[in-house]
Amino acid sequence: MNKEQRLHLQNSVYIDFLKGKNVEEIGKNYKLKKSTIYSWINQKEAFIQDKSTVYSQKEQSMIVLKVLSGISVKSLCIDYNLKQSTVYLWTRKYKQSLPNELTSKRAYATDQTTRLKTINSLLKSTSITHDMSVFEKQAIITSLRPKHSLKLLCEVFNYSRSTYYYQYHTKMTIHQLRDQLLKKEIMKVYLKHKKRIGGVKMRNDMILNGTSISIEKMYQLMQDMGISDQSKKKPAFIRPPKRTNENCKNLLNQQFTQKAPNLVWVSDITEIKINKKPVYLCAILDLFSRKIIAHLVSRKCNTRLTLLTFDSATDNRKTKPHMFHSDRGVQYTSEQFQMYLRKQEISQSFSAPGYPYDNSVMESFFSNFKKEAIYQRQSFRTIQEYIQHVNEYMNYYNTQRYHKGIGLLTPMKKEEIYYSFNLS
């Protein structure tokens, strides 16, 4: 290395030092020893100190302020016939002469602003919930670690750094990996059914799609995920001592399992309020497949509602039932409705007074309907909105929802299987 190259290297090292780079970093960049770098820096500062006496302290401050205002060092050196290292040295000394407290406060405020902006961007780019598992937090932090400090990430996700390092260096067991995959499948099925079904039916859906899981494991994972089972313990029923019309006989006698479609239809009416006014839903169900074959929404709860619903059922099925069962509501016990069924030679059956178990299939349907379609959403604004929602649920119930009473099949699938074996 000749003299000219050596001087150029010394100037480059000194300028890097004045720009704020530490000695270790400079040594790595230029492959120099620390002692050599310190020696060059001391020589340069002694030389510049002698040359800087040409300019007064006021003139030096004026040049430094121009640098801080954004004017390039190179242009100032040309204007004032100075070396770049001289201007950088003046600038560094000027910054060091500022009050330490003011500098530290500004630096702290800048750091806090940057930190808050980073946290805000992290919260926007990731989905954080209060019930995130250890593995979910571990995976998110690992994915973000190349761009952000581990200390900040652990603070944002409320996660211990020691836990992170432990999990990072400890491989997940095969059972933990399988649980993670099962949880993804459970959430997929849960959202597919719009959070309407419980563990038994979700397990059935997963098995039909090729995923094997026991019911115990299903409930365990559901508990970990914060998903509650839909079934609730029913209160004990006390049958009231009541006697009514003896002509209304119970011909069905709780024989809810039928051998073929259209043998027995059951019906009931339920009520909700829209804008504080009652709205009624009448539905008719085929006991063989548990399929809803007709439903109708009305502002009035009268015999006309049940007659129109029954006509809709016969139109949809292209036939009539052997027996029609309901409770003892006036809409079904009225002379007009009973005469209508007698003309078509349809046997009419009634539940015992005040005893819902005689029509438990229909009672169970409306219970699930309200739990799955009504209670989980906000109130309806108009009856048209309610009708649209009812239609959507009835289609879901018949074609997608699994039913325990028919072997965890959908009503539509139950009838398809029957007709495939009974084409005649």
Image: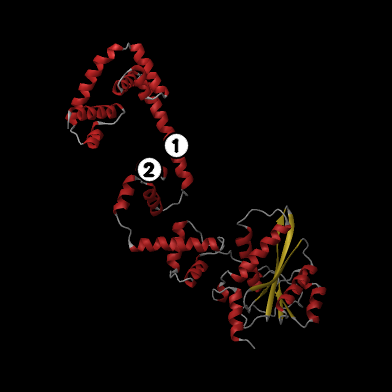
Which is nearer the N-term, disc 2 or disc 1? 1
Of all residues, the one furthest to the bottom in this rendering is: 424
Q: Residue 148 carries which label?
A: 2
How was the colour assigned to the protein in this rendering? secondary structure
**Residue mark closest to the camera, 2 vs 1:** 2
Q: What residue type is labelled 1?
A: Leu
Residue 285 image-quadrant placement: bottom right
Element class at badge 1: helix
Drawn side of residue 105 relative to residue 368, left or right: left
- State the residue in front, 112 or 38: 38
Q: Distance between the residues labelled 2 and 1?
A: 13 Å
Is any part of residue 28 visible from this angle?
A: yes
Q: Examine the rendered structure and indicate whether residue 83 appears above or below residue 247.
A: above
- State the residue in front, 201 or 271: 201
Q: Examine the rendered structure and indicate whether residue 136 appears above or below residue 252.
A: above
Drawn side of residue 395 relative to residue 123, left or right: right
Drawn side of residue 191 relative to residue 314, left or right: left
Q: Position of residue 227 (x, y in %)?
A: 50, 58
Please tell me how many numbered marks the rendered image carries.
Answer: 2
Residue 26 image-quadrant placement: top left
Q: Where is residue 370 in the image (x, y as percent from the top left)?
A: 63, 61
Which residue is label 1 attached to?
116
Q: Residue 365 carries which label?
A: none
Residue at 24% x, 14% y is 50
Q: Examine the rendered structure and indicate whether residue 388 appears above or below residue 420.
A: above
Quarter of the image with the N terminus is top left
Residue at 73% x, 62% y is 280
Q: Which amino acid does label 2 sit on?
A: His
- State the residue in front, 84 or 108: 84
Q: Position of residue 256 (x, y in %)?
A: 62, 77
Q: Position of residue 211 (x, y in %)?
A: 44, 69
Is any part of residue 366 visible from this angle?
A: no
